[in-house]
Image (spheres, grey):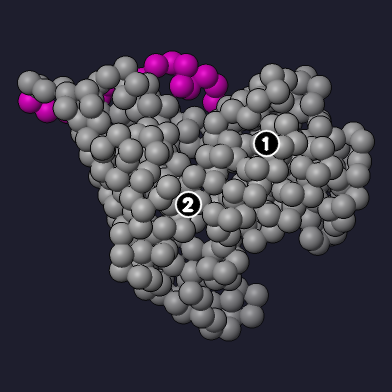
Amino acid sequence: MSGLRVGVAGLGFGATVHVPAFLSEGWEVPVVWSRRMERAQEQAAAFGIPDATDNFDALLARTDLDAVAIATPPAAHFEMVMAALAAGKHVLCEKPFALDAAEARAMHEAATAAGLTAMVAHEFRWTPQRAHLKQLIDEGYLGTPQTADLELFMGGRPAPQPPPPRGAGVAEGGGFLGALGSHYIDGLRHLLGEVVEVEGQTRTLRPDRTDPATGALVQTDADDTFRFSLTFAGGAVASMNASSVAGLGAGGRTFLTGTGGSLLATQPGGNPQQDGVVLGGTLGERSLAELPMPERYRPFEDDRDPRLVAFRLLVREFERGIREGVSPSPSFEDGWRCQQVLDAVRESSTSGRRITIS
């Protein structure tokens, strides 16, 4: 048992991944929060959690919590994070981290001033493929990294689709760029360093959606398709093309090159898989071949949800941060830097210009 105690706010993804992950890692979860009391009570009963509430201020006033995990839609993140920090709670916040870079920076600065552990839930850093790519690049497999080419094409649903799950539109934090693009931007920063220039486009190719509750046709401006190109401070360049409405879809592909070799990771859907592999080849070899996956990147199995192993490893880092008085990466600073890139993609899409990040 870790001896640490967390309240979980938001019971969509929070109930699917956050609560099971914290409980599995030995944390106590004394209380869960939802805007709908019946939802909070239902999930508390399902997990054997003592208390449920729809009053976030009451949750923060409790003395039996060390931390708060915020798994709400992004429009609520700023207010809830700032209140949690003011209440002296360590915070793990879902992505997309904020509605814009100004919010993200304010949350980062507040966490720093409070001296509290604050992390963003970019758990994909702990998937075997992403962790192995990071190790190989750090060890010099690519030589000097030069290019990254990414694709993510998902689909298979007939039109019109249901409304976006993370907000009704861009103003509420909805859209494919934030929902999954943020994970890939975080991954690229983790592998290649800071982004200094951005060019991009976002599009809503299927604005017609069906409200599952009423069957009515509704419109959304949340992007379902995006592309971007990034330049990194170290000189590497990256590009990504992605769509969530791409017919049957072809999954994801990450191809990295450098002065000494190449690396390739593929996945069948939007998220990297726990059984994913990495292919590589160095100069002089004739083709890419599967590289042995270090056992430490698959330390245990958890078949309840494909994201749970990576998320549990993130929770372990969150606990380490609390015990050591630090904010491990992906920290709120990482969340802010990622949000700068998201904002720049949208600004570039509107203006048609390349955007410089300082």
Work out whether residue 197 can be spotted: yes
Q: What element carries label 1?
A: helix
Query: Is residue 314 shown left or right of residue 198?
Result: right
Q: Mostly what secondary structure, the magenta segment? A: loop
Q: Closest to the observer: 298 or 105?
A: 105
Residue type marked 2: Gln
Residue labelled with disc 2: 340
Give the percent coordinates (x, y) of residue 1: 77, 19
Residue drawn at point x = 30 percent, y = 34 percent: 234
Query: Is residue 286 shown left or right of residue 4?
Result: left
Of the residues under marks 1 and 2, which one precedes in the sequence? 1
Residue type marked 1: Thr
Quarter residue 292 falls in: top left
Residue 353 vertical placement versus 111 (above, below): below
Q: Is mark 2 on a helix, strand or loop?
A: helix
Residue drawn at point x = 54 percent, y = 54 percent: 101
The span from disc 1 to disc 2 (Cα, nearest Å) is 18 Å
301 falls in the magenta region: yes
Crowdedness of circle 1 by 10 Å Cα count: few (<14), some, many (20+)? some
Residue labelled with disc 1: 112
Residue 125 vertical placement versus 53 (above, below): above
Give the percent coordinates (x, y) of residue 190: 42, 34
Residue drawn at point x = 53 percent, y = 83 percent: 217
What range is drawn magenta here?
286-304
Residue drawn at point x = 64 percent, y = 49 percent: 106
Q: Closest to the observer: 232 or 168?
A: 232
Numbered tag placed on residue 28 in the rendering: none
Query: Is residue 41 shown left or right of residue 216?
Result: right
Give the percent coordinates (x, y) of residue 132: 37, 24
Work out whether residue 308 can be spotted: no
Q: Closest to the observer: 277 or 325?
A: 325
